């Protein structure tokens, strides 16, 4: 993977992490559950990692479809 593509992928991961952190933090505020931004960030990392692992497992187990 070239350097430009690598930074693009890292940038997308950071944006995804920041968005998930913000959603968790705002949801905590709305529900009256006090949560620190650090805790929300850690939860966002956990959710993203579990989701990515699940997606990769799903892609490996899904049978390949033949075209034609």
Image (cartoon, helix red, strand yellow):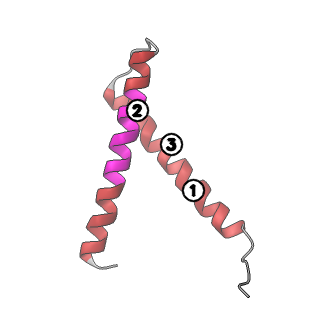
Q: What residue is at 35 percent from the left and 33 percent from the top? A: 22
For disc 2, the neighbor class at 10 Å (few under 14, some 14 to 19, many from 20) is some
Q: What residue is at 72 percent from the left and 67 percent from the top? A: 61
Question: How many numbered discs, if any?
Answer: 3
Q: Would residue 52 appear left or right of 19 to someone viewing this image?
A: right
Task: Residue 47: give its label.
Answer: 3
Q: Would residue 41 appear left or right of 56 to someone viewing this image?
A: left
* Picture coordinates of residue 5, whole percent (x, y): 30, 73
Q: Quadrant of residue 23?
A: top left
Residue 45 seen in render: yes
Q: Earlier in the sequence, mark 2 or mark 1?
A: 2
Q: How far apart, in angstroms, are the residues tagged by discs 2 and 1?
A: 21 Å
Residue at the farthest bottom position: 68
Disc 1 secondary structure class: helix
Q: Earlier in the sequence, mark 3 or mark 1?
A: 3
Disc 2 secondary structure class: helix
Q: Which residues are magenta?
A: 13-25
Q: Nearer the viewer, mark 2 or mark 1?
A: 2
Please determine whether, in this image, residue 1 is positioned above or below residue 38.
below
In which quadrant of the rendered image does the C terminus lie?
Answer: bottom right
* Picture coordinates of residue 62, whole percent (x, y): 72, 68
């Amino acid at each position: 993977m070239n350097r430009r593509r690598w930074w693009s992928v890292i940038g997308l991961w950071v944006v995804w992490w920041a968005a998930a952190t913000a959603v968790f933090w705002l949801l905590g505020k709305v529900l009256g559950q006090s949560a620190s931004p650090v805790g929300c960030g850690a939860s966002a990392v956990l959710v993203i990692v579990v989701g990515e692992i699940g997606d990769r497992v799903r892609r490996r187990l899904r049978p390949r479809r033949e075209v034609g």
